[in-house]
């Protein structure tokens, strides 16, 4: 005879997830992605993945930034510096800088 498994509802999973995330959010982790069963947080160069299983168990996994995130940060900094140089060049060309 097989037992029937009670799968938790999305509302219950979200409540469990909120409770599991609370200490991390208080410790200045930033929330990047969030749904009923999973959350992705980031702090500095660390990722934190919190998952609530169908039976209500909580799994927390911490990892370093992946290559895509590191490259994305580098591209953002390069674009920021390039835009600042363009703005200063335009301001100098227009005579707005002394």
Image (spheres, grey):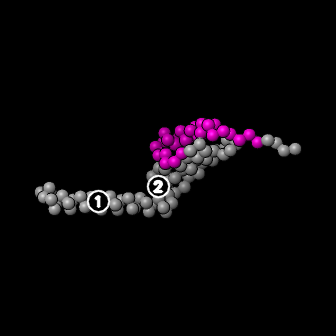
The spot of residue 57 in percent (x, y) is 67, 43
Task: Answer with the quarter of the image where residue 20 lies.
Answer: top right
Going by the image, does 6 lie left or right of 95? right
Is 41 left or right of 78, judged from the image as shown?
right
Q: Is 72 rendered above or below residue 52?
A: below
- Answer whether residue 10 is magenta in the image: yes
Q: Nearer the viewer, residue 38 or 57?
A: 38
Q: Which residues are magenta?
A: 5-34
96 sits to left or right of 42 = left
Which residue position holds label 1? 83
Q: Is residue 54 visible?
A: yes
Q: Which image quarter is the N terminus in?
A: top right
> Between 56 and 6, which is closer to the camera in this rendering?
6
x%, y% of residue 62? 56, 52
Horizontal and vertical percent position of residue 41: 51, 48
Few, some or many C-alpha atoms within 10 Å of disc 2 (few <14, some 14-19, many ≥20)? few
Q: Residue at x 18, y 58 (%)?
A: 91
Q: Quadrant of the C terminus?
A: bottom left
Q: Which residue is mark 2?
A: 45
In the rendered view, tell whether residue 17 sits above or below residue 80: above
Of mark 2 and mark 1, the one earlier in the sequence is 2
- In the displayed orientation, state which residue is furthest to the right: 1
Query: Badge 1 local density, few (<14 within 10 Å), some, or many (20+)?
Result: few
| Element assignment for label 1 | helix
What is the secondary structure assignment of the residue under circle 2?
A: loop
């Amino acid at each position: 005879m097989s037992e029937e498994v009670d799968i938790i509802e999305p509302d219950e999973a979200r409540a469990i997830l909120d409770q599991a995330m609370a200490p991390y959010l208080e410790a200045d982790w930033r929330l990047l992605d969030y749904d009923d069963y999973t959350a992705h947080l980031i702090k500095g160069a660390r990722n934190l993945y919190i998952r609530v299983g169908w039976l209500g168990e909580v799994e927390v996994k911490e990892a370093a930034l992946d290559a895509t995130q590191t490259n994305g940060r580098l591209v953002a900094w390069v674009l920021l510096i390039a835009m600042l140089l363009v703005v200063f060049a335009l301001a100098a060309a227009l005579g707005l800088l002394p």
